Amino acid sequence: MQTTFLAGERRPYIRDSEENRRVALIQATQDLMAEGGPRAATVRAIAERAGVTPGLIRHYFGSKDELSRAAYAALMDGMTAKGADALYGVGAEPGERLAAFIAASLRPPVLDSKAVGLWAGYLHQVQADPALLAQHEAGYLRYRDQLQALIADLDRIASPARLRQDAIACNAVIDGLWLEGSVLPGGFGPGELVRIGLRAVGAILDRDLLCYRMFIPEIGMVPDGETA
Amino acid sequence: MQTTFLAGERRPYIRDSEENRRVALIQATQDLMAEGGPRAATVRAIAERAGVTPGLIRHYFGSKDELSRAAYAALMDGMTAKGADALYGVGAEPGERLAAFIAASLRPPVLDSKAVGLWAGYLHQVQADPALLAQHEAGYLRYRDQLQALIADLDRIASPARLRQDAIACNAVIDGLWLEGSVLPGGFGPGELVRIGLRAVGAILDRDLLCYRMFIPEIGMVPDGETA
DNA sequence: CGGGTAATTATGCGAATGTATAATAGACTC
DNA sequence: GAGTCTATTATACATTCGCATAATTACCCG
């Protein structure tokens, strides 16, 4: 729907920095991919949402595939950055840090109805493109290793194999809750997923993580048993 | 790539029953959706894989959207059927039944690299189509209720709210392991996901489920601690 | 063995896709 | 303020998409 102009007139524009244009196009790509999947992320739709014309995609990225790759790379970078941010400013106690990490993974902006759409939209492209697959696997393992390091800091007595299994299980809890919460946004009360996640991970690791809920804004003062 | 025939010759064919043609087209749709996502599931590609020409899609389903809906409905039906099959022939003890249910969800054919591709491929269409969304939510809740019923049979002392939270958490573990195992098929040893799932769910419910591993083929005789 | 019928194929069409190239006009320099 | 560069737009094109319609032929029934 290129906003119409008077017949014979050329669309006015203002020049912008390369950086701004790139991020605008990447953002538009992610938004469309999240909302409507690969079929909605066409060059024309992307350009329109970014406020430019399709030619700029080729100008800045060479091809749509390259823009798509760049958008996925930006997505992965953003996810890891959020994971790092989650531990910023948190106390030194291992249990508290683990609780903060879990809570951050189960609330916006990580838990977002668009996030799972974005993830699903890229899935096939990732599986088909070796470069993207390697990038994806690296990001996934980085996240799991981060989690495993937090678990190891708990100073439990556990073999390396058991530590790995625990990390996989805790990661699965977080992933599963992230999935359910993103697909059915209205299916859970505020903070409910965080509380369930803390309890489940705590049970798997045989540690009480809910005792750190005073540090978790959305569930700090709610009594333990019943969440809306 | 319509397999070539001598110039001027018409493609030979044999008539088949409506049922066979419908299932062939639905199967082809699911395969292509799983392998390459929505962009790969074109009418021409579907027809080619089903061994017919595109016109038959219109003839039997009216439109591609309707075929797509039928394929998704078939997918959901298949999933619930597998869930029911998992409990067939299992003993009456609640813990054993729960363990069997978990194990069935974490091994083929439920755990399949194609399954997650299929799920991802349909995600946006499901979210956009109210009819599909309702069907999806019904299927999801049916699965979770099934799980919750198995948990309730354990005769633990737990409030209804707690039971709901436990069911959500256990479902999240299974979903998360299913996701990781499907996306990274080579990342886990045989039976490793089943073992991790049994241990994690058992920890959440404060019950030992690994004691039922003798009923689980792939991990029956492996010692507890270390899995390859 | 010879129609009748409809299952199946063949063909065509308008719209949308990605990409390539040409044309224009903002913004900077001197 | 004229000149120049290139960011940006405009246009064109081959391909592919879903869908509609026409043509044919495999199978059933007499």
Image: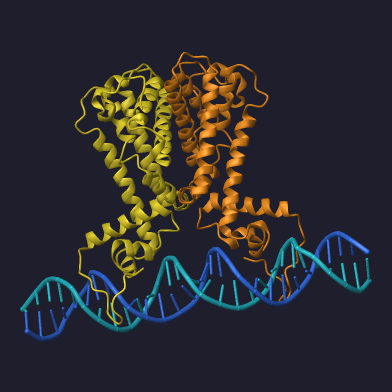
Chain colours: A orange, B yellow, C blue, D cyan
> How far across and down, in percent of the image, does residue B221 sit?
26, 23
Q: Nearer the viewer, residue B78 or A136?
A: A136
> How far across and down, in percent of the image, does residue A123 sit?
47, 47
Q: Nearer the viewer, residue C14 or A163?
A: A163
Tell me what residue is drawn at x 30 percent, y 68 percent. Answer: B56
- Whether residue A116 is visible here, answered yes or no, is no
Q: How many marks?
A: 0
Residue D12 sits above or below residue A81 on the image? below
Residue B89 sits above or below residue D9 on the image? above
> How far across and down, in percent of the image, does residue A44 sit?
59, 63
Residue A8: quadrant of the picture: bottom right
Q: Nearer the viewer, residue A88 or C5?
A: A88
Q: Nearer the viewer, residue A115 or C21?
A: C21
- Whether residue A41 is visible here, answered yes or no, is yes
Q: Is residue B171 left or right of residue A195?
A: left
Q: Quadrant of the N terminus of chain A?
A: bottom right
Residue B191 sits above or below residue B11 on the image? above
Q: Is residue A108 left or right of residue B147?
A: right
Q: Is residue B11 left or right of residue B204?
A: left
Residue A107: quadrant of the picture: top right
